[in-house]
Amino acid sequence: MKLSTRHTRDVPKKQVLSIIIPSYNAGDRILTLLKKLKTLHVPQVQKEIIVINDASKDPVYKQVSGQEGVIYLEHSKNKGKGGALRTGFKRATGDILLIQDDDLEYDVRNIPKLLSPILSGEAEVVFGSRRLNKKNKYASMAYFLGGSFVNFVVKVFLRQNITDAITGSKVFTRKVYEEIKPIESQGFDIESELTVKIVKSGFRIVEVPIIYSPRTRKEGKNIRWYHAFKLITALWKYS
């Protein structure tokens, strides 16, 4: 009698996803964000959550620093969003790097959709586009027009038709980061630097529509319409 043998398939190794969160005076929003991230399930990846406290004295960060499953980093002096992300990038060990703002404007439910083109091999970079989701609103008309102008400049300078070049929702592979580093920007202009360097390096970029719920200035929104000029200056510099 011939005995049957059972062959076991090798289980594919999960890729590590580093979720990098630059944070400043986030209040309880950061706790809500971390709770949502911990319960988020993406079968193909293993999550690494990194929070960078950019010299905020908010007592909420004492709760963040003690949380299991969170890598907590802290600046002694404020370095801006770019400076915080630079710290996070250097600490991250992931195969995929994902930028997540701390203020809940960018919905955690976007993450599986953002990862899909990378996990399928379709792209090395994914931009979460607020403009591709027509249901999204903006903090003000000035903010919307400022972003439109930046997108126009990107099209002119880089000959790349990106609908949301300065989105705070960007994901890219470790290979992309190794190619575009060192990152130099300290403030919000890091969005321009990342976009320019990614485009110039020739990586495949996919945009996906995302859910976006903007805060108002009264609710603590830090970026202003006039930051568009700094973003444009950075576009010129890195182009």
Image (spheres, rainbow, N blue to C red):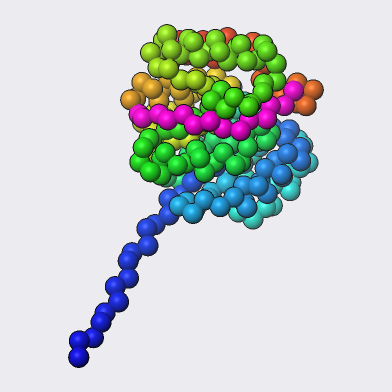
Residue range in magenta is 203-216
* On screen, residue 9 above or below 238: below
Look at the image and say whether residue 137 sits in the magenta stretch: no
Q: Nearer the viewer, residue 218 or 113?
A: 113
Give coordinates of residue 192: x percent, y percent: 50, 19
| Residue at figure coordinates x 64%, y 26% from the top left | 136
Give coordinates of residue 103: x percent, y percent: 68, 33
Give coordinates of residue 96: x percent, y percent: 45, 42
| Residue at figure coordinates x 57%, y 46% from the top left | 49
> Can residue 227 be seen in this snapshot?
no
* On screen, residue 62 above or below 210: below
Classify residue 178 as left or right of residue 24. Answer: left
Q: Which image quarter holds the C terminus? A: top left
Q: Which image quarter holds the N terminus? A: bottom left
Q: Where on the picture, by quarter, is residue 13?
A: bottom left
Q: Nearer the viewer, residue 5 or 220?
A: 5
